[in-house]
Image: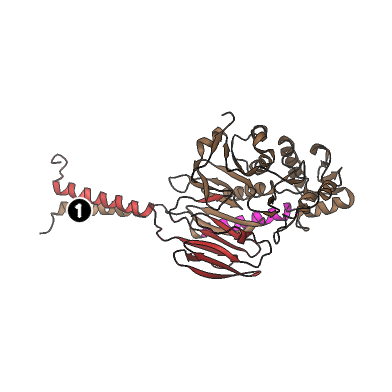
Amino acid sequence: MRRLGLTAGDALVAVAVAGAVGLSWGWVVGDSGTARIARVHPGDGEVREIRLDADAEYRIGGPLGETRLTVRDGRLRFASSPCSARICMNAGWLEQAGAVQACLPNRITVELVDTDGRFDSMVH
Amino acid sequence: MRAPPRTRRLTAALLATAALGACEREPAEPRTTRSYALGTTVELVTWGLDRQAAGEAEAAVTAVLADADARWDGWDADSDLGALNRALACSGRAEAGAGLGPVLERARALGIASGGGFDPTLGHVVALWGFHREEAIPSEPPSAEAIAERLPRGPLAGRFEVHGDEVAVTDPNVRFDLGGFAKGLAVAAARDRLHALGVDAAIVNAGGDLCAWGRPGRRPWRIAIRQARGTGPLASLELPEATCVFSSGDYERYFEADGERYHHVLDPATGRPTRGVAAVTVIHPDPGLADAAATALMVAGPDDWLAVASALGIRTAMLVETSGRVRLTPAMARRVRFEAEDVATVVEGDG
């Protein structure tokens, strides 16, 4: 180090700064989510986020009328919807990250957010 | 005590370097937006685009898919295909919209190559079952007599002719339905449009069938494959290369009557829903082929799926039986990772 003109103090500073850079990269590229949430996409309306850690009922408006979503024990289901096909209701409880269900006639899509960031999209 | 000047200069230089590194740091998360088209939800996942570019990409995908609907939705009376079907019902010969003839010819070629498992002329039988209607799911099956009356006869190769922009049908039971193919064409068009816009990394997912290209940063795209009985992931895979993943299944549009499940994937030979297969997943860079193949492999079933896959040039595929057992080609077995527990698998075929 003397040949490079650096002292022990210089080396200590360099190590400390390099360590800070490394930690900051980890913060940026690592997982950031902690709570489990569902994201509700109501047609042309604003996306709404629902927490799954509190039992509740939600009413979401669509072109055919009101869709009701039920959250219980960390899971979500379509409790009722004005469509006649009832595909959304028949799907039952959504509980795994990445699960997606829609009421197409009422233009409402619900996805359980993959807060661990494991998947970018789902084939179904 | 104040640090010597040389130490202060070194410290400042290192901190400046760290700050520059932070500025160049790439976005951590892809951006996902959703819309409705092709009778389903459409998901666009992009990475590395600023807000304006992302908005332009979304608008482009919406426009392309609306155009696809206007051309190939056989259940829309105002679409090119809807108008053709209506005209053919009257006279048996009609002008097709621009580009529609080659699409029908390609669909027929895929149908022939699949041994008839994919069939673009089955529209009347599809209408009998009613699964094409977005607002309603049927509650009982049509009669065997009604199906037999409307099932196209003779080999697929001879059911219609295309001469330039004119289409002629030889069987009045022919009604064109491009379900199982049109979505692949539409996703291909959206992908091509985004390429033209310079979007280097994205996923276009239309109702669960997707094409992906590029990478979100340094890692590949990570895709989940849904369980056939349940809403969570059965398996996952990474897509380091540009390709498409399409599926067909018995679990999204179906009804149950007298303990039997009736779903929307019909066997062209019988006019009735396929049996024994809950889902098929195909990986191939050609989305039109992948779409038709996913349907054809469901029709082929566990006994014939490998032969049909080979005939279509599909090497990477997975078939889930209604029992839950999963059959994979060797190429698929090398790619897929199972996320669900206790999955019975068998790897079969060459490669």
Residue visible at 77% across and 58% down? B78
Q: Residue A42's x, y, as percent?
A: 58, 66
Start and end of the magenta stretch?
A: B52-74
Q: Main secondary structure of the magenta part?
A: helix
Q: In this orientation, which residue lies closer to the viewer: B115 or B346?
A: B346
Q: Which chain is brown?
A: B
For disc 1, the marked residue is B9
Q: Residue B293's x, y, as percent?
A: 66, 40
Q: In this orientation, which residue lies closer to the viewer: B323 or A70?
A: B323
Viewport quadrant of the N terminus of chain B: bottom left
Determine crowd level at label 1: few under 14, some 14-19, many 20+ residues with C-alpha closer than 10 A: few
Q: Which residue is most to the right?
A: B91
* Residue B24 visible, this angle: no
Q: In this orientation, which residue lies closer to the viewer: A58 or A5?
A: A58
Q: Residue A8's x, y, as percent?
A: 14, 46
Residue B53 sits inside the magenta stretch: yes
* Chain designation of label 1: B
